[in-house]
Image (cartoon, helix red, strand yellow):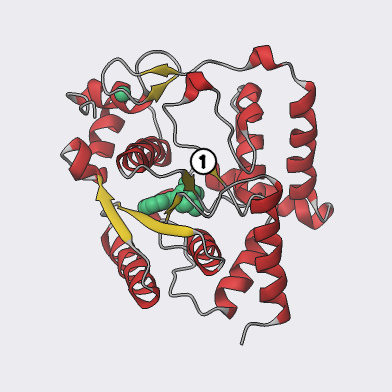
Amino acid sequence: MTSRFANDFETSVLRTVQRYSLASKNGRVLVACSGGKDSTSVLSILHGAGYSAEALHIDLGIGEWSESNRKNISDFCSDRGITLHIASTRDYFGSSVCHIKSLVQSRSDLTSCAICGVMKKWILNRKAKELEAQRLATGHNLDDEARTFIMNLVNGNPELNLYASPGRIFSKSQSLFVPRIKPLFFMRATQIERYSREMAFPVLYERCPCSKGSFGRTIYEDISSFEEWVPGAKDNIVETFLSLQTKLSAKNRTTTLECKLCGEPSRSGICRTCSMLLSVRSSPSRT
Ligand code: AMP
Ligand code: ZN
């Protein structure tokens, strides 16, 4: 039987889905499942509420950590009769994540997480288009959003914060993207962990071993320490940016172009994945 906490948690997530019109029960919602607590919770809640949710897992090939994640999400989906799609960088770029990372890193100062993140995003969007998904859901939570807001500021790219929302609405010029939704946008990592543990989801609670010492993880930990001084600091960061967004002018929004090489979305005419791969070899193909 689900506890009162778990019930309230689910209600709150589904309220976000309804309030922001994140998904409808007619179209396929592809949930990007890393095998961790966040995306597994999204998949479980959407599937349980009657959405046509399917899972997409990218096998990153990072040793035992990836093997456990892959097994966990496979077991979870087969237990519940949920369709699971598995993709890898080999399918699209012909090499393992680690191989591409080492090549790119030998020629640039991009971090391991940045390289992996760019490729994951590319595969998620491409696969979602191939599967004609109506929505692509991720497990991003309040803590992730607070971290991204601060990272964008520290990197001198505050305009990127214009796009953060539980559901990204795309204009016609941005139809290259499958609309991305974040049902856990307002949920804290601690709440999600409690929910996932109560539901006994088969997930790993450790972070990716490659992210140790990364900039993103450092900011994440710093923001968590703000909470010792200001309880609710993360909520304040996210709410402040959401309220600022409406005040910032729409003309600040950048248009999305089609990457000249692979056809995926890009800001400059060549997407980040292609520029990265070009620096080491050829780009992926168009659909
Ligand atoms: P991260 O960028 O690792 O913090 O993950 C953010 C979100 O991206 C997760 O909540 C998932 O929805 C998605 N994601 C991360 N890794 C994978 C993966 N290996 N396969 C599919 N989706 C993933
Ligand atoms: Zn490209």
Q: Residue at x 77, y 54 (%)?
A: 227
- In the orientation shown, which residue stands out farthest toward the right? 230
- Is the C-beta of the residue carrying label 1 under 8 Å from the nearest atom of ligand 1? no
- Residue 20's spot in the image, x, y percent? 68, 44
Q: Residue at x 25, y 27 (%)?
A: 277
Q: Residue at x 60, y 46 (%)?
A: 22
Judge whether residue 213 can be spotted in this image.
no
- Residue 16's spot in the image, x, y percent? 68, 52
Q: Nearer the viewer, residue 241 or 61?
A: 241
Q: Nearer the viewer, residue 140 or 81?
A: 81
Residue hosting label 1: 180
Residue 181 sits in quarter? top right
Classify 187 as above or below 192: above
- In the orientation shown, which residue stands out farthest toward the bottom? 1
| Quadrant of the displayed image that contains ligand 2 | top left
Q: Is residue 172 left or right of residue 195?
A: left
Judge whether residue 64 can be spotted in this image.
yes
Secondary structure beneath dot 1 equals strand
Q: In the picture, which quadrant includes the C terminus?
A: top left
Residue 72 sits in quarter? bottom left
- Residue 145's spot in the image, x, y percent? 63, 44
Q: Is residue 50 left or right of residue 32?
A: right
The image shows a total of numbered marks equal to: 1
Classify 153 as above or below 185: above
Q: Is residue 210 left or right of residue 173?
A: left
Q: Hey, what amino acid is under mark 1?
A: Arg
